[in-house]
Image: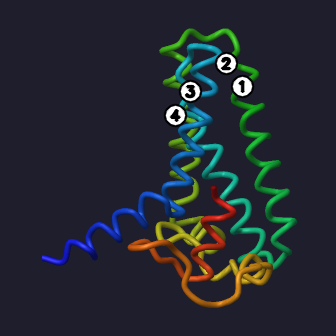
Amino acid sequence: MNWEFIVGRSLASAFGADAAVFALAAIGLNLHFGYTGLLNFGQVGFMALGAYGISVTVATLGFSLWWGLALGAALSVTLALLLGLPTLRLRADYLAIVTIAASEIVRFVARSVSMREITGGSFGLSDFADEFYAINPFPGGSYGLGLVQYSARGFWVITVGW
């Protein structure tokens, strides 16, 4: 058993892009729950709508990454307002139910067969990150410390994510 490989991959995953996404979601949930004491699962739907807003704008419609970021943020804020205004007076358990339902609606719509041409359905969209990688300031090569190594692209994603 190659312990060096196992530990290196585990550490790389712990500091990788997926960990940054989950940390960002946890920070949003902690911020909302910490200030209000209300459990809100809407962050999942907001993140999904923002991500699909970016990817559809860039991959499907052919706009710039910056327009995609603006549209993704605008879609997330719009969903938050549409969800937040009617639920202002709900108790904690009902707010959790409504926000889970809204997040599930976003997931079902994005993965539906009728939206496959726009959102990619269950497979999602890919090959839209060229403009993001074009602004990478790190020259090609390998970056890391000890057992943890990243490519220049991976290190750029981690730098932006964290």
Q: How is the image coloured?
A: rainbow
Q: Residues within 10 Å of mark 2 (few under 14, many from 20)?
A: some
Q: What is the number of the mark on residue 40?
A: 3
Left or right, residue 92 beside residue 79: left
Which one is in front in this view, the residue at disc 1 or the one at disc 3?
A: 3
- What residue would you read off at disc 4? 101
Q: How many marks?
A: 4
Image quarter of the N terminus: bottom left
Q: Give how far apart the Cα atoms at labels 4 and 3 are.
A: 11 Å
Label 1, residues with CA under 10 Å away: few <14, some 14-19, many ≥20: some
Say what amino acid the circle numbered 4 marks. Ala
Position in image of residue 9 (x %, y %)? 35, 70
Which numbered disc, 2 or 3, marks the residue that appears first in the sequence? 3
Residue at the image point whose x is 86% and y is 67% from the top: 66
Q: What kind of element bears circle 3?
A: loop
The residue pinned by badge 2 equals 87
Question: Residue 84 shows which numbered tag?
Answer: 1
Q: Image height check: is 40 above or below 23?
A: above
Amino acid bearing label 3: Asn
Question: Residue at point 63% right, 25% down?
Answer: 32
**Badge 1 vs badge 2, beta-carbon distance below 8 Å:** yes
Residue type indicated by callout 2: Thr
Query: Circle 3: is it few (<14), some (14-19), or many (20+) Cα within 10 Å?
Result: many
Q: Amino acid at mark 1?
A: Gly
